[in-house]
Image (cartoon, rainbow, N blue to C red):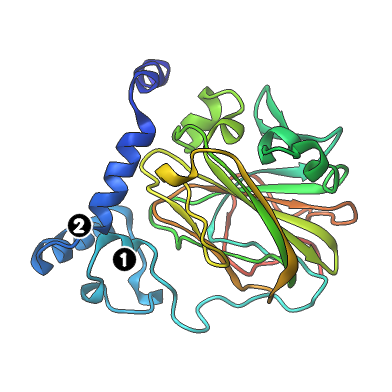
Amino acid sequence: MAELSYTLLRLLPKNTLSRAVGAACRASAPRPVVRAVIRAFARKYGVDMSEAERPIDQYPTFTEFFTRRLKPGARAIAPGELLPVSPVDGTIGELGDIVESQLYQAKGKHYTLAELIGGPRAEEDARQFAGGAFCTIYLAPYDYHRIHAPLGGEICGYVNMPGQLWPVNPAGVRNVEKLFCVNERLTTFLKTPRGACGVVAIGATNVGRIRAMYDDVVTNARRTRQPARKLYERPLRVEKGGELAVFEMGSTVVVLFAPGVKLAASLRPGQQIKLGEALESP
């Protein structure tokens, strides 16, 4: 059944449909209609609104609800400038060392750092993470959908890669070869006390946009249909736990670390994790 579903998906204009869904979610509608849609979604997926910045009835569009901020203090950021933390709420997909510049997607499926990052200087950008570590985190519809810095330091630049918009749920991971390398993605490069760090936000079906918080960068838009790479002459300061980007619907993040970072042995695929929880043993 999954194979048939993905055969049918190949025939659909996934990017166009996703832009249409995103536009609908951002559109204004009568307040009772918006409230009904948001409440139905929250019930279906078990969204914990007790953590949200605003009451459920105070979001004027579905997108504003979906990209909601949390109440101050709702997530504790594990202290220590050298201790990397999860950049998002979600479920760990895969994690481990980056061996021979390869990362693990699922059983029998691998991809390379350069394929993941993409762009005009992919090999050069990938080199800084060779021999390091990675962690893939899937964000379900009920999760908080803002992306934060795993370590403090400087934002050095980004690569914005147009691509497909396959589902990134477990079925998508199993069925689409090099899924994270063919979908649209935005990689943010950080310079931290632990060396280079990359935060790769990956788009998916019905993800209208990935929007950077530090620059005018939006994925799945007609103005961003070519690969774009930008390095800042003056890097931008960011605190550990500071906002980097936001998903306007659910997706996946792959966080990359330079050699020297060893992810905690207690972390396992399938484990739920929250923004700010340590990725390395203190």
- Residue position marked by numbered label 2 in the rendering: 40
Q: So how many labels did they put on this image?
A: 2
Question: Is 93 situated above or below 255?
Answer: above
Q: Which residue is mark 1?
A: 65
- The amino acid pointed to by label 2 is Ala
Task: State the residue at coordinates (85%, 36%).
Answer: 99
- Which residue type carries mark 1? Phe
Give left or right: position of 255 versus 204. Answer: right
Q: Secondary structure at mark 1?
A: helix
Q: Would you call the spot at circle 2 few (<14 residues within 10 Å), some (14-19), or many (20 or more)?
A: few
Residue 38 sits in which quadrant? Answer: bottom left
In this orientation, does residue 97 appear? no
Q: Please name whichever residue, 200 or 154, is drawn nearer the observer in this view of the structure.
A: 154
* Residues under numbered marks 1 and 2 in contact, where contact means CB atoms less than 8 Å apart: no
Circle 1 or circle 2, nearest the eye: 1
Q: Quadrant of the N terminus?
A: top left
Figure quadrant of residue 242: bottom right
